[in-house]
């Protein structure tokens, strides 16, 4: 097996890029030819960014699971598709060949059918990082159900919001999850969520930790019992539903600068082609390589680079249930040695945290099988980049710094490992098909090199979001209304003297905390739900491990018996409403917030104070009451 569209040299990159801009339709059609279609498309692209309307491979019919499973089950049945490393290094790893994975997926697809799930129905998946999570995702895709995976760290309230928004009819979960030396009671959290979710008719529960759980008659059923039922029915086959290229494949909720998280919608055809193309090219995957993406399938990185990208390329994807620091901070590197990993893809926050544990945890590791290192989720600082390159890659592995978003479906700006040049802390060059544009403060296109601005994309690509679920206007407002005819990413960006891109971070009110995307408005809403809280303002501040930490300024008029306890209580409320990942790192009680005369909080000033800036707070003349700034500065934590 080889990938005819795999770029092998800088010259090939340049010519692919040129072709992708001059004739995008031909460029993507040539790539799409390499997939299994039940029916070819009759037109490659229809689009405008005004509505927006984006359609790729019009009238093409396919099922993504035939591309991820059936074709490989036939041509390379015994190649491992998924290798699973459990939380506990002493327990057994599990392995699924393409042939085995296809069978498991068809079996569970039949379970879904038995439970009345039909094409177009939404299924919420809230599971630990076990192979059954990937199986559940693919089983939905098999029958044309739309999956909405919710990360295991979100609270009952967050799950309920997501289930209600998508009107899910079925939930797939587990009794509990292992995470380092802790267990998390997933089913109990689902039970709390479902108090508010009338649309859910069935809950399928996988046994993982075998903690006692409540099972409601008529609604809740065990995964294992359901499998037994389909086994006794004796038909292991499940046909792949014919899907239109533009039918929804999944919804994934993500935070924006306002309101509740929005359901980013990806469709079958374009997403598949794009996830595959970027996987094959950025990581320079070669058949037989073991690819280890450390993300959770609850995030887009897991969707695109544990499941759909690697499997659609017939690759071997390593899936890890645990955390990088348990039983010790050498866990990733033990996994690399144990499974002879060739490509590892992780987040700067993990790199920085392992770096902080010191050299002891790498000194007796081999790491000799590694060929490519990847990073994603937030800007990587030069120190972490060099540590990764030197200590893990032994200076012989290219580091791919991959910039992209839930909305983009796949990697957008990144060097191609060993093929295009790398530069520490720079994501470098766009993937063929991607046309980045920087917009300066005047709202004009910043031309040439050595410049900066807000990062936009000028032309559609197959993996881009199509809408936000149930609210197309919100999609337009969020991404297509800021600048005419451009997709606005929300990120700030520099273009250096070589034309390499460097992402500087979000320019909106979204924080990347440990690579998790959190909206400041969401955290404020949660804090404001705490009794006694009058108002709050949340900003990010530089954090050595997390990238950004969460700094909350809170006006509180309740009675403090103990200020520290009140802070912990507020954190607890945030954990209840959103999840532990959104707990503030610092809470400062204040008497007032800096506001303009029209009542708008001036976050710019609060951000500067949180960053430790003492003098240069910028223009404060628009403030209603400049005295609050001084007071806030005095109380800074
Ligand atoms: C940030 C994750 C700098 C960025 C795939 C983006 C990055 C947000 C990088 C999307 C990178 C992602 N360098 N920043 N290599 N990769 N980001 O939706 O701010 O969870 O807008 O998708 O992460 O986060 P999301």
Image: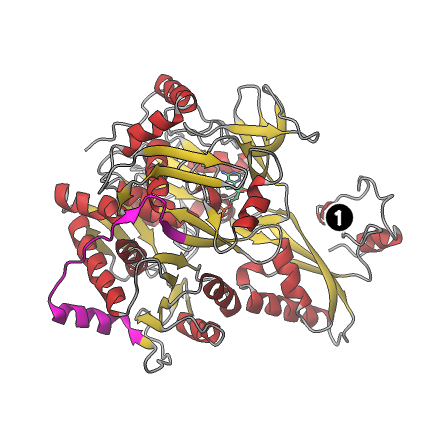
Q: Position of residue 471 (x, y in %)?
A: 52, 54
Residue at the spot x=37%, y=50% of the render? 248
As drawn, is 521 to the left or to the right of 413? right
As drawn, is 534 to the left or to the right of 111? right
Q: Position of residue 439 (x, y in %)?
A: 62, 30
Residue 546 appears in view = no
Q: Is residue 584 above or below residue 460?
A: below
Q: Which residue is mark 1?
A: 609
Q: Is residue 464 above or below residue 11?
A: below
Q: Is residue 84 above or below residue 6?
A: below
Q: Position of residue 563 (x, y in %)?
A: 73, 70
Read off the magenta span. 221-250
Q: Nearer the viewer, residue 268 or 623?
A: 268
Q: Residues within 10 Å of mark 1 (few under 14, many from 20)?
A: many
Q: Residue furthest left?
A: 234
Residue 238 appears in view = yes
Q: Quadrant of residue 558?
A: bottom right
- The color scheme shown is secondary structure
Q: Nearer the viewer, residue 475 or 521?
A: 475
Residue at the spot x=25%, y=46% of the render? 68
Q: Nearer the viewer, residue 51 or 163?
A: 51
The quadrant of the image that shows the C terminus is bottom right
Q: Position of residue 196 (x, y in %)?
A: 49, 74
Residue at the spot x=37%, y=79% of the render? 213
Q: Residue furthest bottom?
A: 217
Q: Nearer the viewer, residue 280 or 69?
A: 69
């Amino acid at each position: 097996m080889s990938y005819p569209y795999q770029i092998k040299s800088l010259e090939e990159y340049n010519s692919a890029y040129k072709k992708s801009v001059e004739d995008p339709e031909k460029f993507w059609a040539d790539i799409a030819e390499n997939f299994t279609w039940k029916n070819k498309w009759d037109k490659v692209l229809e689009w405008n960014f005004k509505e927006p309307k984006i359609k790729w491979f019009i009238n093409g019919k396919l099922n993504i699971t035939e591309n991820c499973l059936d074709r490989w089950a036939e041509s390379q049945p015994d190649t491992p598709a998924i290798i699973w490393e459990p939380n506990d290094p002493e327990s057994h790893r599990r392995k699924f060949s393409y042939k085995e994975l296809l069978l498991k997926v068809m079996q569970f697809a039949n379970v879904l059918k038995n439970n009345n799930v039909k094409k177009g129905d939404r299924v919420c998946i809230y599971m630990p990082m076990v192979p059954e999570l990937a199986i559940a995702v693919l089983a939905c895709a098999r029958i044309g159900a739309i999956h909405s995976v919710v990360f295991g760290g979100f609270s009952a309230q967050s799950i309920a919001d997501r289930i209600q928004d998508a009107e899910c009819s079925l939930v797939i979960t587990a009794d509990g999850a292992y995470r380092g030396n802790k267990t998390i009671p997933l089913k109990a959290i689902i039970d709390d969520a479902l108090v508010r979710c009338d649309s859910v008719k069935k809950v399928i529960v996988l046994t993982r930790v075998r903690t006692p759980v409540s099972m409601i008659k008529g609604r809740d059923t065990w995964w294992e019992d359901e499998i037994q039922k389909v086994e006794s029915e004796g038909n292991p086959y499940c046909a792949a539903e014919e899907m239109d290229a533009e039918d929804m494949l999944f919804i994934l909720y993500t935070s924006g600068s306002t309101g509740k998280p929005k359901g980013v919608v990806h469709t079958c055809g374009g997403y598949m082609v794009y996830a595959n193309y970027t996987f094959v090219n950025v990581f320079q995957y070669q058949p037989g390589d073991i690819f280890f993406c450390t993300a959770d399938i609850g995030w887009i990185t897991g969707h695109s680079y544990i499941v759909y990208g690697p499997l659609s390329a017939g690759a071997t994807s390593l899936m890890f249930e645990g955390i990088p620091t348990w039983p010790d901070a050498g866990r990733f590197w033990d996994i690399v040695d144990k499974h002879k990993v060739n490509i590892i893809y992780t987040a700067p926050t993990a790199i920085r945290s392992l770096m902080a544990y010191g050299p002891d945890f790498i000194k007796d590791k081999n790491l000799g099988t590694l060929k490519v290192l990847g990073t994603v989720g937030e800007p990587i600082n030069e120190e972490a980049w060099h540590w990764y390159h030197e200590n893990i890659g032994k200076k012989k592995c290219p580091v791919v710094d991959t910039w992209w978003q839930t909305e983009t479906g796949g990697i957008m700006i990144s060097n191609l490992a060993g093929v295009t040049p790398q530069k520490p802390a720079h994501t470098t060059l766009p993937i063929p098909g991607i046309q980045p544009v920087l917009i300066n403060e005047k709202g004009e296109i910043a031309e040439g090199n050595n410049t900066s601005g807000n990062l936009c994309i000028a032309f559609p690509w197959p993996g881009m979001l199509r809408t936000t679920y149930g609210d197309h206007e919100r999609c337009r407002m969020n991404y297509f209304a800021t600048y005419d005819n451009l997709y606005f990413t929300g990120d700030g960006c520099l273009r250096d003297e070589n034309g390499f891109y460097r992402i500087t971070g979000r320019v909106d009110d979204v924080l990347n905390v440990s690579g998790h995307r959190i909206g400041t408005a969401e955290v404020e809403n949660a804090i404001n739900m705490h009794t006694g809280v009058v108002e709050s303002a949340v900003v990010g501040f530089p954090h050595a491990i997390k990238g950004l930490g969460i700094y909350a300024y809170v006006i509180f008029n309740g009675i403090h018996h103990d200020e520290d306890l009140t802070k912990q209580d507020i954190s607890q409320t945030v954990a209840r409403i959103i999840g532990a990942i959104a707990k503030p790192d610092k809470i400062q009680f204040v008497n007032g917030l800096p506001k303009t005369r029209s009542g708008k909080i001036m976050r710019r000033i609060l951000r500067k104070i949180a960053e430790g800036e003492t003098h240069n707070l910028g223009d404060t003349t628009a403030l209603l009451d400049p005295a609050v700034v001084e007071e806030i500065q005095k109380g800074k934590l």
